[in-house]
Image (spheres, grey):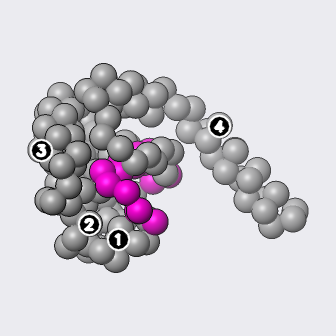
């Protein structure tokens, strides 16, 4: 699968489509972003069951701000519509593969329980 361009218009449907979604926040002027791009593309080609989206922070400044992106590249992972990972910096190929494996192995029922527990704690319930 090729990477897709993610914009304000398709962000929500992309993240909520189910399964795993990896988002690469990047810019054309960013050297580390350009170095990470081929790694991201190769992973997209070998993991066809995962959605690989690219968000150009120059063209999509509102999205970048909404996600609190202060350093690029930043990689975010979502599973079943839930954000499960966010980290700035270019990952090497082995690091990206390890991340993909970790996201695949997540027990999403446990993740949801933890989210509910945190939500209850923050609301004082």
Q: Which residue appears at 46% of the width and 28% of the height?
A: 102
Going by the image, does 109 lie left or right of 58? right
Disc 2: CA contacts within 10 A as few (<14), some (14-19) or many (>=20): many
Label annotation for residue 2? 3
Name the image quarter holding residue 79: top left
* Nearest-to-viewer mark from 2 and 3: 2
* Contact, mark 3 vs mark 1 (Cβ under 8 Å): no
Mark 3–mark 4 Cα distance, whole angstroms, equals: 31 Å
Q: Which residue is mark 4?
A: 110
Percent coordinates x, y for residue 6 in the rendering? 23, 62
* Contact, mark 1 vs mark 2 (Cβ under 8 Å): yes
* Nearest-to-viewer mark from 3 and 4: 3
Q: Which residue is mark 1?
A: 63
- Whether residue 70 is visible here, answered yes or no, is yes
Between disc 4 and disc 1, whose residue precedes?
Answer: 1
Mark 3 residue element: loop
Mark 1–mark 2 Cα distance, whole angstroms, equals: 8 Å
* Contact, mark 4 vs mark 1 (Cβ under 8 Å): no
Mark 4 residue element: helix
Segment tinted magenta in the rendering:
68-82
Q: Nearer the viewer, residue 95 or 120?
A: 95
Mark 2 residue element: loop
Please say whether residue 105 is one of the residues in the magenta stretch: no
Disc 4: CA contacts within 10 A as few (<14), some (14-19) or many (>=20): few
Q: Against 19, is 25 above or below?
A: below
Q: Which residue is mark 2?
A: 57
* Nearest-to-viewer mark from 3 and 1: 1
Percent coordinates x, y for residue 71 in the rendering? 37, 57
Q: Against 109, is 63 above or below?
A: below
Between disc 2 and disc 4, whose residue precedes?
Answer: 2
Q: Which residue appears at 25% of the width and 27% of the height?
A: 93
């Amino acid at each position: 699968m090729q990477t897709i361009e993610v914009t304000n218009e398709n962000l929500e449907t992309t993240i909520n489509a189910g399964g795993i979604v990896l988002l690469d926040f990047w810019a054309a002027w960013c050297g580390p972003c350009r170095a990470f791009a081929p790694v991201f593309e190769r992973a997209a080609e070998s993991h066809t069951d995962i959605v690989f989206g690219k968000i150009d922070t120059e063209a999509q400044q509102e999205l970048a701000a909404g996600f609190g992106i202060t350093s690029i590249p930043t990689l975010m992972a979502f599973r079943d519509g839930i954000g499960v990972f966010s980290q700035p910096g270019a990952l090497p190929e082995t690091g990206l593969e390890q991340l993909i494996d970790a996201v695949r192995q997540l027990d999403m029922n446990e993740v949801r329980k933890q989210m509910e527990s945190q939500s209850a704690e923050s609301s004082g319930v």
